[in-house]
Amino acid sequence: MNRGILYGLATYFLWGLFPLYWKLIDDIPALEIIGHRIVWSFVFVWLIILFQGEWVNFRPVLRQRRTLLTYALSGSLLAVNWLTYVWAVNNGYIVDSSLGYFINPLVSVVLGVIFLREKLRLWQWIPVGIATLGVLYLTVSYGQLPWIGLTLAFTFATYGYIKKTAPLNSLHSFSLEMGFLALPALAYLLFLGYSGEGAFLRSGWMESLLLAFTGVVTGVPLLLFGGAARRVPLSMLGFMQYLAPTLQFLIGVFVFKEAFTFDRMIGFGLIWIALAIFSFDSYRGYREAWGQAKDAEIE
């Protein structure tokens, strides 16, 4: 459990710093960035598999149709999440994207209850209701659904649920996800290169290097996340996740000077109150369970 918590915290800290990286290449279209992110992530993860001699253990998985379909779905969800997030960051919506990851922990909690039969106490259900009010308030104040935040929240919460219940470890599952996405992504990048519109090797060595390094930047926290998802209850994983949007929000407001209006303050405030209540109750429940386990050991 302790190792899973460390993996989770490291994951969300790295994800919280992502806006700084994507802003370095914000003159490149988001779809092209995602194409490179997929292809270089595929290269990164398969180099690890070959280096560790994991191919022999991995090969039987390729004959399991249900497993392949599962990771085709999770890979698709990941691609939608990535595209939405990179587009939002590079078009000045870092604060809006952070909203999605503030909501995401509570969506993860609900999925854990519905599909994994994880139990919640009353003081964990209350913050879910408060966060819903926050989203409704932002919807009314925006005049439309906060689609960036909701897309990010539901795609990644569902991705986390699949990772929690799927059979493979984080390395094998991520390699399958990238395997399904790599061919269409590579075809798209080759088309851009052939048409003369691609940025790689045309926009300077620094941007080309940053595009190639997206594989490492993407792969390391995702492998950590996969390890955390298999070791930590989904409700606790959702609780830890607020670290990433907090960092993203601070970067959006204080580094890139995005507007934080009074209406946003009210909507975000409701969600922060919900997270505070949920966090306190989760910590209290964890302490009680830990105390009961220690008492059982003594007896």
Image (cartoon, helix red, strand yellow):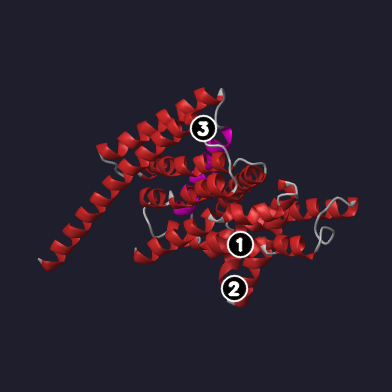
State the residue in front, 154 or 138. Answer: 138
**Secondary structure beneath disc 3?**
loop
Residue 105: image quadrant is top left
- Give the magenta-colored segment's residue range: 147-164
Please report the residue visible at 61 percent of the width from the left and 72 percent of the height from the top.
48
Question: Looking at the image, can residue 62 be seen?
Answer: no
Q: Tell me the chief SS of the magenta region.
A: helix
Work out whether mark 1 precedes mark 2 in sequence or the reverse, and give the earlier one.
2
Badge 1: few (under 14), some or many (20 or more) residues near its Cα, within 10 Å?
Answer: many
Q: Nearer the viewer, residue 275 or 6?
A: 275
Q: Amino acid at mark 1?
A: Val
First of labels 2, 3 by sequence position: 2
Tag nearer the camera, 2 or 3? 3
Q: Is the N terminus in the top left, top right, bottom left or bottom right quadrant?
A: bottom left
Residue situated in front as seen by the camera: 117 or 246: 246
Q: Which residue is mark 3?
A: 261
